Amino acid sequence: MIYSEDYRADVKHVNIPIFIPHLGCPNNCVFCNQHNISGVTHFDPNAVESQIAAALSSTDSIDKKNTEIEIAFFGGSFTGINRDNMFYLLNTAQKYIDSGDADSIRLSTRPDYIDDDILHILSCFAVKTIELGIQSLSDDVLSACKRGHTAACAEKACLDILEAGFTLVGQMMVGLPRSESAEEIYTARRLCSLGVNAARIYPAVVLYDTELYHMTKRGLYKPLSIDQAVQRSCDILEVFIGENIPVIRIGLCASDNLDRDSVYAGGYHPAMGELTISALYLKYIYQAFSSLNLNKEDLSGGDYIIYCPRGAVSKVTGQNKRNIKHIKSEFNINNIKIIETDTIEGYNIKIASAI
Ligand code: SF4
């Protein structure tokens, strides 16, 4: 299975994900059931080669000149697995880099599995991107989640990874035990100041067979509603956008092979990213109309145009035209037309009277 992330306009990016569930991970973070998230219950390192070969064969139609193909080890903590397996996986992936079939290696791991020795090993292979499961930079939240490391450890890992010349993706969560909006905004801002190159935002999801599930059942944890997950993710997205840091994923999704039957409660929605971006557009559209500083009577019956970046019409409109309905009713507007244009980029919008 392949999925792509178009976070650079000029180069298309394709990941070949290889999931390594819980391999080498002695931890049990309260929210984690890696078997459910990755959909993989057994991992056979020897099968990796055929998985990569099969995935690469489906890239034949891709314009490889303008596409960066990364073999991505996701799921567990790659740098924590036993050294023989780690070298086996790196060597296997490297063969495809050396043959020119893939461009680089990507992996995910935890902050306390990063040290000089590991970074040196990774630098001997074509590892380009390290995704770090940071989740929170609040010690209180990390401790409530039984993460087993401190915020200082995560910050040092970020700096060491960047210093060693790797691309760093910071993964953070919203809605964790003892985490409020303030802790989440602090974490996002701190990740920006540490220099992450991209981010992923995951609203906490309560999976069956996790400690978070039992905490929820005992009333010790209140899962996020979908609306709360969207709003909290939206606040974080805005922080990253403000610092020009691409957010390459919001929410667990089908690409993570999430078994939906394993979700008990919390911030899981198959279109979490779309909902979050839509909420951000609503905020910006609301601000734009508010800044007109007009009375509702002045706007009454008026027709307006919202100009947005190309490809953003559905997100600006919102699911079931939610954004448009909200703005029309809030500002007493007769009609709103949305026009996509090349002259507007990012998450910007412009409004104009249609008259
Ligand atoms: S470190 Fe990662 S794989 Fe291990 S329990 Fe925590 S979230 Fe799961």
Image: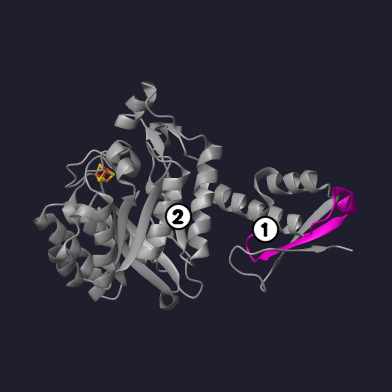
Q: Give the range drawn in magenta.
A: 292-313
Kindly state the secondary structure of the residue where label 2 is placed.
strand
Give the residue at x 55% y 44%.
231
Type of the residue with mark 2: Arg
> Foreground residue, 135 or 296?
296
**In front: 127, or 154?**
154
- Residue at 64% across, 66% down: 310
* Amino acid found under the numbered disc labelled 1: Val
Q: Measure how far apart labels 1 and 2 are at the Cα level.
A: 19 Å
Residue sitting at 11 percent across and 52 percent down?
82
Q: Is residue 167 visible?
A: yes
- Mark 1 nearby-residue class (10 Å; few <14, some 14–19, many ≥20): some
The quarter of the rendered structure image containing the N terminus is bottom left
User: Which quadrant of the view contains residue 127?
Assistant: bottom left
Up the image or down, 102 lies above or below 176; here it is below
Q: Mark 2 points at which residue?
A: 249
Can the viewer see residue 253 in this picture?
no
- The image quadrant of residue 29 is top left
Secondary element type, mark 1: helix
Q: Is residue 160 above or below residue 73?
A: below
Q: State the residue position of label 1.
A: 313
